[in-house]
Amino acid sequence: MDIFLKSFSMLSHGLIGYIVPFLFVLTIVVFFHELGHFIVARLCGVRVLTFSLGFGPELFGFNDRHGTRWKVSAIPLGGYVKFFGDESEASTPSAETLKAMSEEERKGSFHHMSVGRRAAIVAAGPVANFILAIVIFGCLFTFFGKPITSARVDSIQANSAAATAGFQTGDVITAIDGEKIENFTDMQRIVSTNAGNTLHFTVKRGQGTVTLTATPELREIKDTFNNVHKVGILGITRSTAPGEASTERVNPAVGLWLGVKETWFVAKSTLVYIGDVFAHRASADQVGGPIRIAQISGQVATFGLSALIHLAAVLSVSIGLLNLFPVPMLDGGHLLFYLIEAVRGRPLSEKSQEMGFRVGLALVLMLMVFATYNDILHLTGS
């Protein structure tokens, strides 16, 4: 009981300052996700009944000229688009309702569309998240520049992975496992996500090149706000000599390409972490829920609007990936059903789909409970 009382006390004093940044970030991500569904649905001729930011009772809204109700609801932890023919916000159909539709009504019914169109509408949400992330990252690189820090080794920690591998002061890391390294941040990212994995470093030493093999160690580090992160550590520090660090401005085309690369990095890192958790190579205590997101949003907001927008891009990638998991209730679950339908030549029975949605709901709720439990432990330092 003490842990929950302590958590409540901390929430009442600290989380209030995180609400506005949290809602700002989450609203951007959810809006574009649902907008992806909405736009493709309209292009496919589907009638859209509701576009909602949040769940539960409506706070305010309006009807557009196509009859769609745009609204903001009381529980701001997601959103949904409800199509003509849907029985619920999860886009589950009612067989009786669908059978009773006239031929004209079927033309605007989501569930009477071809499998390909339904799949396109469902996939459009996660795709919109990835596009949003690419655009945000691209704009940040274009308007704020790309930080460039030389991957030159300034010092080496004793008894570290770098010391064991034979790194020397003045070495410049140019590639890791064949992947080109342009700056120190590139090197840090690869190392931090590869704790326990053997990496091959191409290093410029003097006028020559050597290859070193090192295995980053898993360590706990604290960021500026004393949040604990478990990452891979090599045991080197970067050079701080004049001219070793700069910010490079790029044109919009290059910025978008860098945005694509950044989005791919976030997605790949997330998938690698999830794989490591299932393979018992990493702990699941880094999985966070709304409370953790709210806390991080408030902390990041202290660095300014650009940092908060950057967080929105990272969260957008995560939301896009999460929704592609083949779990009923999520977009990926719907896509799985459509794939089965395409292979079988007919959809699964209503009973099978209902059972699938129940299992999916249970899995989603279990994940939310687990993430919230992690958030509480994180807040209380337990």
Image: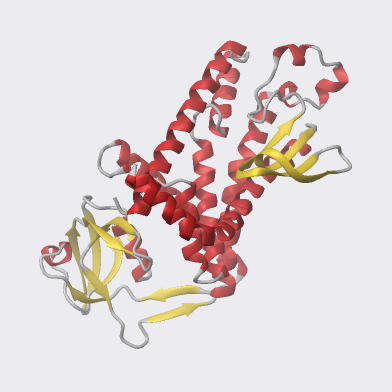
Rendered location of residue 303, percent (x, y)? 49, 71
Query: Height in image: 29 above or below 115?
Result: below
Rendered location of residue 96, percent (x, y)? 74, 11
Q: Is residue 228 visible?
A: yes
Res 281 quadrant in image: top left
Q: Nearer the viewer, residue 182 or 124?
A: 124
Query: Height in image: 187 above or below 123?
Result: below
Rendered location of residue 361, percent (x, y)? 52, 27
219 horizontally vs 78: left or right = left
Res 125 quadrant in image: top right
207 horizontally vs 314: left or right = left
- Residue at the farthest bottom position: 242
Give the residue drawn at x 54%, y 64%: 308
Q: How is the image coloured?
A: secondary structure
In the rendered image, which quarter contains the N terminus? top left
81 horizontally vs 333: left or right = right
Give the residue drawn at x 42%, y 54%: 9
Rendered location of residue 190, percent (x, y)? 33, 58
Q: Nearer the viewer, residue 153 or 365?
A: 365
Res 283 quadrant in image: top left
Query: Height in image: 4 above or below 304?
Result: above
Q: Is residue 262 visible?
A: no
Q: How many marks?
A: 0
Give the residue drawn at x 11%, y 70%: 158
Give the residue drawn at x 10%, y 65%: 159
Query: Height in image: 382 above or below 123?
Result: below
130 horizontally vs 245: left or right = right
Q: Nearer the viewer, residue 313 or 254?
A: 313
